[in-house]
Image (cartoon, rainbow, N blue to C red):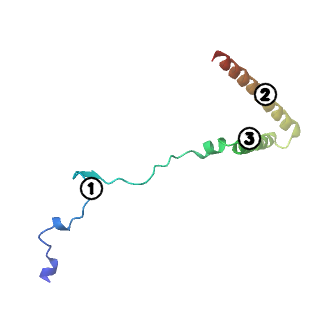
Amino acid sequence: MASANKKSGNSTANRTVGTQRRTTSGTSSSRQRSRKTVKKVPLLTVIKSSSAGRFMLIILGTLCVLGLDFLFSLNQFDRFFLLLGIELIAAVLIGWIRFVLHGRSDDNN
């Protein structure tokens, strides 16, 4: 029993080699992982990059706006159409301003 509890005298021989290997020139270098690095791209960016994805985002945005208008109008159609008209006028004005400013930036370049 006493011999079972004894450790071997040469403990360095039982150690395993770490992450270092010898190259052909005799110097040691770290082990290189062969895992490729994958660039993570946000899902919204992937969806916006295709025309079908942009179309689906426009449809989803339109449905959200119509749903919120219906929720805010509390089932009164005159209030619903008033909110919808204000939003359409604002969208047209913002689009027109962007169009004009984008045209001016092209003239300067």
Name the residue rendered at 84%, 33% in the picture: 82
Give whichever of 91, 109 is nearer the camera: 109
- Which residue is the site of mark 1? 20
Name the residue rendered at 72%, 20% in the picture: 100
Mark 2 to mark 1: distance in Å?
65 Å
- Mark 2 vs mark 1, foreground winner is 1
What's the residue type where badge 2 is placed? Val
What's the residue type where badge 3 is placed? Ile
Name the residue rendered at 66%, 41% in the picture: 48
Q: CB of mark 2 within 8 Å of CB of mark 3?
A: no
Give whichever of 15, 76 is nearer the camera: 15
Name the residue rendered at 69%, 22% in the picture: 102
Quick check: 41 above or below 78?
Answer: below
- Which residue is the site of mark 2? 92
36 vs 29, left or right, is right
Q: Provide residue 81's location: percent of width, then percent of height.
A: 86, 36
Quick check: 23 above or below 95?
Answer: below
Labels 2 and 3: the sequence-earlier one: 3
Q: Given the current orientation, which residue lies at the most extreme bottom position?
A: 1
- Which residue is the site of mark 3? 58
Say what secondary structure mark 2 lies in: helix
Give whichever of 65, 105 is nearer the camera: 105
What's the residue type where badge 1 is placed? Gln
Q: Provide residue 12's location: percent of width, then percent of height.
A: 16, 64
Image quarter (top left, top right, bottom left or bottom right) of the C terminus: top right
Give whichever of 7, 103 is nearer the camera: 103
- Mark 1 vs mark 3, foreground winner is 1
Say what secondary structure mark 3 lies in: helix
The image quarter containing residue 95 is top right
Q: Provide residue 24's location: percent of width, then percent of height.
A: 25, 54
